[in-house]
Image (cartoon, rainbow, N blue to C red):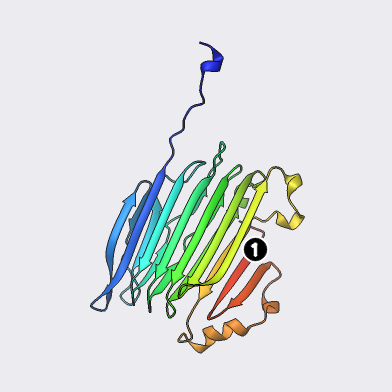
Amino acid sequence: MNASALTQPRHQRSRGRLDLDYALHEGRTMLGGLYQSPPMRALFPDPEADEAPICALVNTAGGLAGGDRVDIALSLGAGARASFSTPAAEKIYRSLGPATEISVSLEAGPGAVFEWIPQETILFEGARLQRSMRADIAEDATLLMAEALVFGRAARGETWRRGALQDSWRIQRGGKLLWADGWRWRVISPLNLPTPSALLARKLWAAWCWPARWPRPICAMRSAKMALWPAWCGPACSLHAGWAVRLRCGKG
């Protein structure tokens, strides 16, 4: 067979989606709608009697590779409360060319309390990730977000010296932009890293938003000087009725 007639193999790629919404019914937060397609799946552990419902987002494939895409859309109706997390770290494996794409959209209605606290995302050597985080919350809604990126598992001697990362965050409150942030980094070799401090094993992106009705000690945190934070903390800004903080540390 003529070698020129050979074509590159087409790899099987996943296109996962999870759409979920909670609504307040007779004083209780109840599941209003759910759509899920592989490899994404939602599980519902039993919460404690005085706690909000918990939803665990599971990637049944065990990880994502180049060319895979996952879309997640979560919504809380007026007065609803819920916590969303994952049972394990998400893993982004080496890409043969295309990027892994993750899109997350969060929506919280009036008086809702939304917690987005998944476990960390691990980028393996050669991984290419494009991630988009969008949150739209009502004026009096409460949103807690915490995300962590781990560049290789330090305990296994892994590093992340080849790959690409594009991370975009947008948080709106009452239809107005509250916080926008973006980060783009392409690593070809250790030589193109901008500074030695860029060899971070972990970067934690976290955003907190809370209304004034929260307890005074929590609201008082917003006025604390950033000089009190350890030296490994990254940039932070105080938002109207909230905080946006980036943290960095040297071990994953």
Residue 210 in percent (x, y) is at 49, 79
Q: Quadrant of the C terminus?
A: bottom right
Tell me: residue 110, above or below residue 107.
below
- Residue pictured at 57% horizontal, 64% vertical: 205
Q: How many marks?
A: 1
Identify the residue at the far top of this view: 1
Identify the residue at the far bottom of this view: 216
Of residue 14 and residue 55, the one placed in the foreground of this image is 14
Tell me: 157 left or right of 212: right
Tell me: 161 left or right of 43: right
Q: Which residue is mark 1?
A: 248
Tell me: residue 95, above or below residue 37.
above
- Residue pictured at 50% horizontal, 42% vertical: 65
Residue 5 in percent (x, y) is at 52, 16
Q: Would residue 45 be seen by someone viewing this image from the given angle?
A: no
Task: Please tell me how crowded label 1 is: few (under 14), some (14-19), or many (20+) other residues with Cα within 10 Å.
Answer: some
Task: Give SS at disc 1.
Answer: strand
Identify the residue at the far left of this view: 26
Q: Would residue 53 be seen by someone viewing this image from the given angle?
A: yes
- Residue pictured at 33% horizontal, 69% vertical: 53
- Residue pictured at 41% horizontal, 56% vertical: 72
Residue 135 in percent (x, y) is at 47, 66
Tell me: 26 left or right of 163: left
Residue 158 in percent (x, y) is at 63, 46
Which amino acid, mark 1? Arg
